[in-house]
Image (cartoon, rainbow, N blue to C red):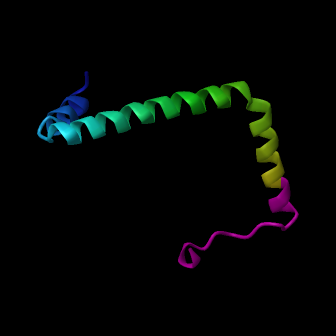
Amino acid sequence: MTKTLEKAFAEASKLSAKEQDELGAWLLSEFESERKWEELFRRSPDALARLGERGLAEKRAGYTEELDPEKL
């Protein structure tokens, strides 16, 4: 285990049991979500490439506009 992860766990151990359970559940959920996305990306590289090409084509055709963070 890395020093950074050890430090994070040391801090987490100071939380109440309820907060530790919530943190643990969240972390496990994040791991599962990451595994699902990795699997989806692995199974559909062609679909992702097509979506990327479509986005680039729309940009070249002038159908997109730059994002202005001030307008969000």
Q: Quadrant of the C terminus?
A: bottom right
In the rendered image, residue 28, in percent from the top left (x then y), is placed at 39, 30
Closer to the camera, 12 or 60? 12
In the rendered image, residue 9, in percent from the top left (x then y), is placed at 20, 32
Closer to the camera, 16 or 6? 16
Closer to the camera, 12 or 17? 17
| Residue 62 sits above or below residue 41 on the image | below
Identify the image quadrant of residue 69.
Answer: bottom right
Identify the image quadrant of residue 4.
Answer: top left
Judged left or right of residue 10, residue 70 is: right
Judged left or right of residue 9, residue 50 is: right
In the rendered image, residue 3, in percent from the top left (x then y), is placed at 21, 29
| Residue 69 sits above or below residue 56 on the image | below
Closer to the camera, 66 or 37? 37
In the rendered image, residue 64, in percent from the top left (x then y), is placed at 77, 66
Instruction: Residue at 25% x, 25% y: name it.
Output: 2
Residue 4 among magenta residues: no
Q: Which residues are magenta?
A: 57-72
Instruction: Residue at 67% x, 25% y: name it.
Output: 42
Most distant residue in the bottom direction: 71
Residue 67 among magenta residues: yes
Judged left or right of residue 44, residue 28 is: left
Q: Quadrant of the N terminus?
A: top left
Instruction: Residue at 58% x, 78% y: name it.
Output: 71
